[in-house]
C-alpha cells in the first residue's frame, strides 16, 4: 500500500534501516500435516459477508492457510513476538510443516506484504480510471482505498505497519510498490491542478498526507462500529476533496462538477 503513517515515512526512498528477518530457518523433508483447517482471519469477509479474495492465487491450500494464520498472528502479536510454532498451530499444522512452503518467518511476511501492496496498486489504478473529472477520480480512489483498509483491517495492519521487519531485498521491492501507489494519486492531483479544479501548492506532500489518512483507518477500525467501511470511505472522500479545494457539488460537499 502506498504510504507509511506516523513515524514511518511514506516515501521510504532513503530508509535503509531494514529490520532483521527474525525468522527461524530450517527445513523438514517430510512432515504430516494436521487435518485441521485454519480459521479465517478476522477480516476474512467484508461487511457484506463476501470472502477476501486477496489470497485466492496462493497455492497449495496449505500455503494459503499458513498465510492466513500468519496474518492473524502478526496482527495480534507483532512480527517479532510471533513464533513459527504459533503460526503453524493456528494453521492446524506441525511446526515443521511451515518450512515445506516458506523458508523463514520473514518470507511469510514478504508474501503478505507483496500481495497487499499489489492489491493497493490495483485498487488505486482501477478507481483512478473509473471517471474523467479529476475530482471524481480522486473521490473514487479514496473511497476504494479506505474501504479496503477498513474491510481488511487485520491484513492491512500487517501490510502497512510491519514493513521494517522485511529483509533488505524484500523491503526494496515493497517500497517500489508503495511508490507506485503514491505516483497514481499524485497523477490525479496533478491533473486536477492542471484543470483548475484543485488548489494544491505541494502535490507530493498532499499525496502522502492523503495516503496516510487512508491507511490509518486500518489501525483504528473495528468491525461492528458505528460506521460501515463504505460510510467511512464516503466521509474520507469528502474530506480529501475539501482538502484539495475541489469545487462543491450539488450536495454542498466537495466534489467534481458532476458529483
Image (spheres, helix red, strand yellow):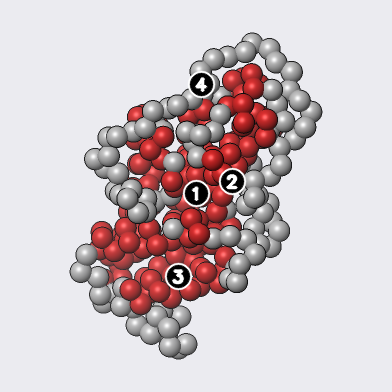
Question: Dot 2: what SS?
Answer: loop
Residue lying at 48% horizontally and 73% vertically, measured from the top left: 235
- In percent of the image, x 25 and y 75: which residue is there? 199
Mark nearer the N terminus (1 vs 4): 4
Residue placed farthest to the right in the image? 35
- Give the mark nearer the N terminus: 2 vs 1: 2
Q: Which residue is mark 4?
A: 24
The quarter of the displayed image where residue 34 is located: top right
User: Which residue is tagged 1?
Assistant: 157
Q: Tell which tag, 3 or 2, sits nearer the viewer.
A: 3
Q: Earlier in the sequence, mark 3 or mark 2?
A: 2
Closest to the camera, between mark 2 and mark 1, is: 1
Q: Secondary structure at mark 3?
A: helix
- In the rendered image, residue 218, in percent from the top left (x then y), is placed at 50, 56
At label 4, counting other C-alpha atoms closer than 10 Å, the crowd grade (few under 14, some 14-19, many 20 or more) is: some
Left/right of residue 30 with respect to residue 120 in the rendered view: right
Alpha carbon separation for disc pair 1 and 3? 19 Å
Amino acid at each position: 500500500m502506498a504510504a507509511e503513517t506516523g513515524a514511518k515515512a511514506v516515501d521510504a526512498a532513503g530508509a535503509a534501516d531494514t529490520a532483521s528477518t527474525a525468522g527461524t530457518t530450517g527445513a523438514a523433508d517430510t512432515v504430516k500435516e494436521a487435518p485441521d483447517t485454519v480459521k479465517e482471519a478476522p477480516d476474512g469477509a467484508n461487511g457484506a459477508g463476501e470472502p477476501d479474495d486477496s489470497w485466492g492465487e496462493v497455492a497449495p491450500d496449505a500455503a494459503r492457510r499458513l498465510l492466513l494464520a500468519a496474518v492473524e498472528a502478526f496482527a495480534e502479536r507483532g512480527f517479532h513476538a510471533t513464533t513459527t510454532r504459533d503460526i503453524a498451530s493456528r494453521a492446524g499444522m506441525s511446526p515443521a510443516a511451515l518450512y515445506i512452503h516458506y523458508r523463514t518467518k520473514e518470507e511469510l511476511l514478504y508474501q503478505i506484504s507483496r500481495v497487499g501492496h499489489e492489491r493497493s496498486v490495483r485498487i488505486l489504478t482501477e478507481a483512478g480510471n473509473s471517471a474523467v473529472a479529476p475530482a471524481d477520480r480522486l473521490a473514487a480512489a479514496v473511497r476504494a482505498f479506505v474501504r479496503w483498509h477498513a474491510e481488511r483491517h487485520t491484513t492491512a495492519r500487517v501490510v502497512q505497519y510491519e514493513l521494517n521487519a522485511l529483509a533488505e531485498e524484500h523491503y526494496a521491492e515493497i517500497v517500489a510498490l508503495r511508490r507506485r501507489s503514491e505516483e497514481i494519486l499524485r497523477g490525479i492531483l496533478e491533473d486536477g491542478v492542471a484543470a483548475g479544479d484543485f488548489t494544491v501548492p505541494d502535490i507530493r506532500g498532499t499525496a502522502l498526507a492523503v495516503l496516510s489518512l487512508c491507511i490509518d483507518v486500518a489501525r483504528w477500525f473495528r468491525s461492528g462500529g458505528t460506521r460501515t467501511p463504505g460510510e467511512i470511505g464516503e466521509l474520507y472522500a469528502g474530506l480529501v476533496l475539501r482538502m484539495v479545494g475541489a469545487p462543491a457539488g450539488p450536495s454542498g460537499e466537495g466534489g467534481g462538477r458532476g458529483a
